[in-house]
Amino acid sequence: MKRLYIFALLCTLCVCAHAETVILRTGARVKGTIVFQNDDVVIIRNDEGARFQYPKTDVAEIRSDEETVEEEQKAQEPVEQEIQSSKKASILLELGVGAAVIPNGDAAQAGVGYNVDLLVGSHHIGDKHIFVGGGLGYHGMAVSGTAYNFLPIQAVVRMPLTEEKHAPVFGVGVGYGIALSKAYVGGLYAGVDFGYRCQVNRKTALAVVGFAHFQQAKMAVAETVSEDTTASFVNKTGRSLVTAGIKFALYF
């Protein structure tokens, strides 16, 4: 009868014993089973069987295994929510102005260029704040009294060079510029930019960048028949329209 009682008592202790975590005031944590504690001391045995004794004054908190798991899950939730939030669609708005040039041998024409781009994509690729997307723009230039306007359909990448809150950023874009006038024909479009980006929060960032845009187009150009005559004719000739300047970007 006595042996049966002892056996039942041991079974009860085994069932009731559960893992706990002793959190010290230094921040250190020890996981195991509390084998003894009173107002002065706490003794805990880890999974390897080693025992550790701590004065009660050095112990900040004792938590059950379930409470420790819940705390770790809550600590991970904001990180997971931030990543999920960053993976949602982002919008990139860019406004730029600069000098415009139409190279033509020794007789290059110069003027003013301006652009507005509205792009949609992801602002979080992998674990990096890289914007990949596409969209539409409105690019115009006034050169020698003539306005040239295009609607570029483009795909872009905007990549910070470091993952600091404020970092240099590099970008490229390619697409096709649709001419907004019958006087000229659009063509391939490409752009590069380099500047500095400031991360306001996990979804919003501001950037100031220098840019260069290259737009191919066919336009009417007067050409002489020969050097010995003043006779000329109008021909649609391919030209590269170049705009370089500064632009402001908003990620949101």
Image (tube, helix red, strand yellow):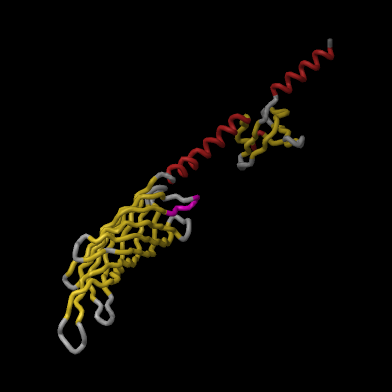
Q: Residue at x 73, y 28 (%)?
A: 35
Q: Quadrant of residue 115?
A: bottom left
Is residue 252 among the parts visible in the rendering?
A: no
Is residue 113 among the parts visible in the rendering?
A: yes
Tell whether position 119 is magenta. Answer: no
The quarter in which the N terminus is drawn is top right
- The magenta span reads 126-130
Q: Residue at x 31, y 69 (%)?
A: 244
| Furthest-top residue in this view | 1
Q: Is residue 148 left or right of 209 when viewed as pictured?
A: left
Residue 34 horizontal/vertical position (percent): 70, 29
Camera-side residue of 129 and 66: 129
Q: Quadrant of residue 225?
A: bottom left
Residue 205 horizontal/vertical position (percent): 37, 53
Camera-side residue of 216 and 90: 216
Residue 174 horizontal/vertical position (percent): 37, 61
